[in-house]
Image (spheres, rainbow, N blue to C red):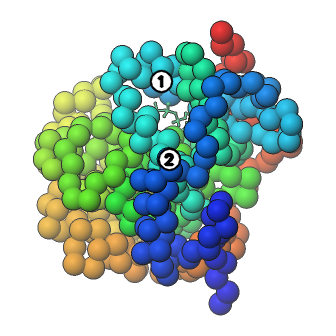
Amino acid sequence: MSITVPVNKRGIIFNPIVDYDLVLALFLEEFNGRWGNVQPSANTGLEGFEEKSLLGTGSFGQVILAKDKVNAEYYAVKIMLKDQIVKMKQVMHVHTEKRVLASIKFPFLVWLEFSRKDNDFLYLGLPFINGGELFTYHRKVNKFSEQQARFYAAQIFLALEYLHYLHLLYRDLKPENVMIDKNGYIKLTDFGFVKRVETRTMTLCGTPEYLAPEVIQSKPYGSCVDWWSYGVFLYEMVNGTSPFAPHNNDIMLMYSKIVDGEYKMIKTFSPELKNLIENLLQVDLSKRFGSLINGNKDIKDHEWFKPINWFSILNQEMPAPYVPQIVNDEDLSNFDRFPDVKRK
Ligand SMILES: Nc1ncnc2c1ncn2[C@@H]1O[C@H](COP(=O)(O)OP(=O)(O)OP(=O)(O)O)[C@@H](O)[C@H]1O
């Protein structure tokens, strides 16, 4: 079987499955070295770009669609208000997000195309992923079949595996951060909570319904928090709602259920899916898949993933179960609608 070998921006070839040591070495060279494979931010704001429409909003600003006036390429530009970043004590997070985005290259992750700044804002230019959020599509269809969920879950598995090899914790897995590209494959976006840890960390962050018990309890944690969120994600994809969705907005009750690992298993899930979820939503770290002696292999080799050929997923050769309809480069019909961009 042929394996397409991804080539990163500097033309260095690596195979993300076979040679992770090389991938890690290249990542570290970028991450610790020259601030990634991009030039330092030019102080020109979005000069040279046409600001088109609003794609989404985040904690520190907006993500807009912008068109490069010279090469006519489209980008999703994350615009962050400097004041807001400082007030919310997120300087380090933004710094890390930029360095990580500039240093990674993997089929199922977005990367940094360029960065800019001006007096008030920071701008991160990302490839425009035009199929919208997985969240929007999932909400439209309500549930995925196990086969469809497996297609997305396999890509997310490979993305997390890649990040973990680089000692990066993603810490914010949720359908809102998974974008669908024009071919129906996915890309993880939003690296605002990514943290590089060689051992363990203790920071409380993430999205409440997806938080692992050890994060809520302020215990030191490692990459297993992503595998917990992955279990929540699988459940939600196939069931329609997440296992710990709060009743009457009672967040404290939801936290106590997460800490106790108390959720309802869905009878209609296949036995394989039930087993995988039970092993991911394990409060006891000595039992959670991803942290046992076989590491990630317990997930990758699990019966539920038997129909998956990992190389054809990586090479994006498997037909996607859903391919978004995109009529032209500015088609935003797959995004939730927002009013047009107006920024001083
Ligand atoms: N590369 C992209 N292509 C198209 N749309 C994108 C892209 N990146 C982000 N978006 C849109 O913008 C939204 C917000 O982006 P993102 O989550 O990165 O912002 P954020 O400020 O980090 O948000 P959060 O508050 O979740 O941390 C996304 O949910 C998505 O709809």
Which circle's residue, 2 or 1, is located before the other in the chain? 2
Q: Is residue 262 visible?
A: no
Q: Which mark is residue 91?
A: none
Residue 243 is situated, as x and y percent measured from the top left of the image, at 32, 47
Disc 2 or disc 1, which is closer to the eye? 2
Nearest the camera: 95 or 302? 95
Q: Callout 1, which amino acid?
A: Phe
Residue 194 is situated, as x and y percent measured from the top left of the image, at 39, 46
Q: Which residue is mark 1?
A: 60
The answer for how far apart the CA atoms under marks 2 and 1 are is 22 Å
Vertical order, 112 against 56 (above or below) = below
Q: Which residue is mark 2?
A: 35
How would you rate the neighbour count of disc 2 (Cα within 10 Å): few for under 14, some for 14-19, many for 20 or more? Answer: some
Vertical order, 133 against 225 (above or below) = above
Residue 110 is situated, as x and y percent measured from the top left of the image, at 58, 50
Left or right: where does residue 26 sit relative to residue 88? Answer: right
Please give the count of numbered marks on the rendered protein: 2
Which residue is depicted at the point 74% across and 31% down? 66
Nearest the camera: 188 or 308? 188
Which quarter of the picture shows residue 74?
A: top right
**Which image quadrant: the C terminus?**
top right
Which residue is depicted at the point 66% across and 13% down? 343
Does the closest atom of ligand 1 sit within 8 Å of the Cβ of label 1?
yes
Residue 169 is situated, as x and y percent measured from the top left of the image, at 35, 53
